[in-house]
Image: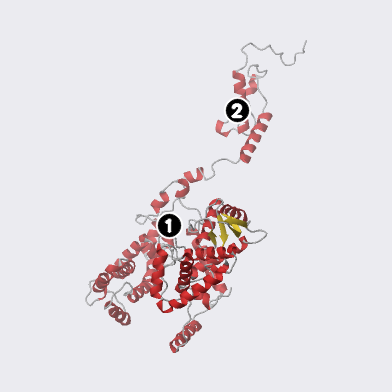
Amino acid sequence: MKINILDQSQQHRPRQHHLAKLGALVTRMQDSERGVPMRDQLLSDTIIPDATTGRDLVQWMEQGLHVTADEALHLSWLLVAYGFVYPLSEPRNLALRPDGSLYRFQAPYFWPLHYSQSEDTDYAIYLARKNIRSKGELDEYEKELYSALHQKINHEWDFVVCQAKEQYRSGRERPKGDRVVLECQERAHWLVRRPPPGALHALDSGLNRVLEPGAEEKPTVELYRRQVMYYQQAALRSRTKSSVSLGSLLKFTESSSVYDPLLTTCLPSNPWVTDDTMYWTLNSPSVEVPTRLRVERWAFSFRELLRDPRGRREFQAFLKKEFSGENLAFWEACEDLKHGDQSKAKEKAEEIYKLFLAQGARRWINIDGKTMDITVRGIQCPHRYVLDAAQTHIYMLMKKDTFYRYLKSDLYKSLLAKAVVPRETDKNARFPRHASPSPVVLRAAEEEARKATATVPQVDLTQASSSPCRAGVYTGGGAPSSLLPLSRVPPGVRLARSLSSSTSSVAPSSPAPPRAAPGSSGS
């Protein structure tokens, strides 16, 4: 999309994007075949062509844009508020009513997209013509604006009056319907551009910018000098191949994925899923023994170590052993100066200078002479970034030297050995998110129980056994199911036992007929 210089220098540039979308939508709505149904309407003994109703506008929004009723009503309200659609029944009510109220699409000439700024001269001509037509019957706020414009552009007031008379005379030559439509369009346009006091001003953008970022600079020697310096610095900038950058990104992702609770399992459990706050307790800033993943993360970079309050406390303890704790204290004081209260910036800067940088300071830090000169000159007019040079020097000193010695020290190794490795909680393992068993598993268990029940023979406990001695003899490799504990019996056999016991409990108490002995012949 090509953007010309005029578009870049508009005061209301951010609003032009959605105004352009609304203009495209209005063009689509005026399509003769698929647009909003429009018809001639009678208004005050005058036929108004191509008028529609608020109900038709909202219905077309719902069907054409596939949105809800509330969204369609809001979008239709925006069209009226920005002046793309104007009311005919109540001209001063710039709010759409989803009923039979009459509305009409505004002419593209009066769209806010094409009419970026309203000039005082144009508004004065409109008020003068309206004053001539209504014979001085203007509204109170229009009379005040008319008088104010008369004083403001008094040097060209004769031109305003002549233009108003000429437009009024040419308007009387038009047909009545066209004249009424043009009057409604102009009135709706100026109600949007110059609304009455207390009314909604949808196009109000506040104060204008002092500097326009898109405005062209005049070609001067200073401009060319800055361009040459910029291109020289760009030519000296190191270039990195995309393969190297992607490899570094992949390496960082692989090393950090283990420590990301969104990519891996959150130990001991995710508190938002299990309602167990142990994760927050183990990773609190003041915890005595941190987790192993937390301690290992400190070795990623020096910034990662300083970001963690627990890691910064351990690093401070290491610096005290090496008699250089003032370096981290100075860095923390500079951070408080930059991000603290601006009204106390001068007092804080002077206090930091006296404590760390002045001659004979109680916690004097060692910086080079060039950095000290920059800091001393800046202290004369202190601000929140006056100590940036000294802070950067101390930060790089700790990052390149002290940080790596801390990672190799016994203090870090002992803390890493004592770090906690939390186990996954039983609650998370026993009650997952979807605790209900799958219907497929339930159906398979029922089929297995049904098959086991069918294969187990039903034993009539009321009948005497013909060979009682064989009931206690078993020569198989394992224990029979009747001698196994209930927890080791298969579900099908367990169900068969329960069925057998229930059958025996309801059996009749009458004695069974005697059975013939083995080997005897029947009668």
Up/down of 487 relative to 341, above or below: above
Please state which of the two labelled residues, at mark 2 or mark 1, is closer to the viewer: 1
How far apart are the alpha carbons under marks 2 and 1? 51 Å
**What amino acid is at disc 1?**
Arg
Residue drawn at x 63%, y 19% as measured from the top left: 461
Residue sitting at x 40%, y 63%: 140
Position of residue 85 measured from the top left corner of the image (x, y, whole percent) = 55, 61
Query: What is the number of the mark on residue 482?
Result: 2
Looking at the rendering, in which quadrant would you find the C terminus? top right
In the rendered structure, the answer to whether residue 478 lies left or right of residue 318 reads right
What amino acid type is highlighted by mark number 2?
Ser
Tell me if mark 1 has few (under 14), some (14-19) or many (20+) residues whose alpha carbon lies within 10 angstroms of its own: some
Residue 169 visible in the snapshot: yes
Question: Dot 2: few (<14), some (14–19), or many (≥20) neighbours within 10 Å?
Answer: few
Picture coordinates of residue 255, whole percent (x, y): 50, 63
For the N terminus, the image quarter is bottom right
Name the residue tied to disc 1: 292
**Kind of element beneath mark 2:** loop
Label located before the other in sequence (2 or 1): 1
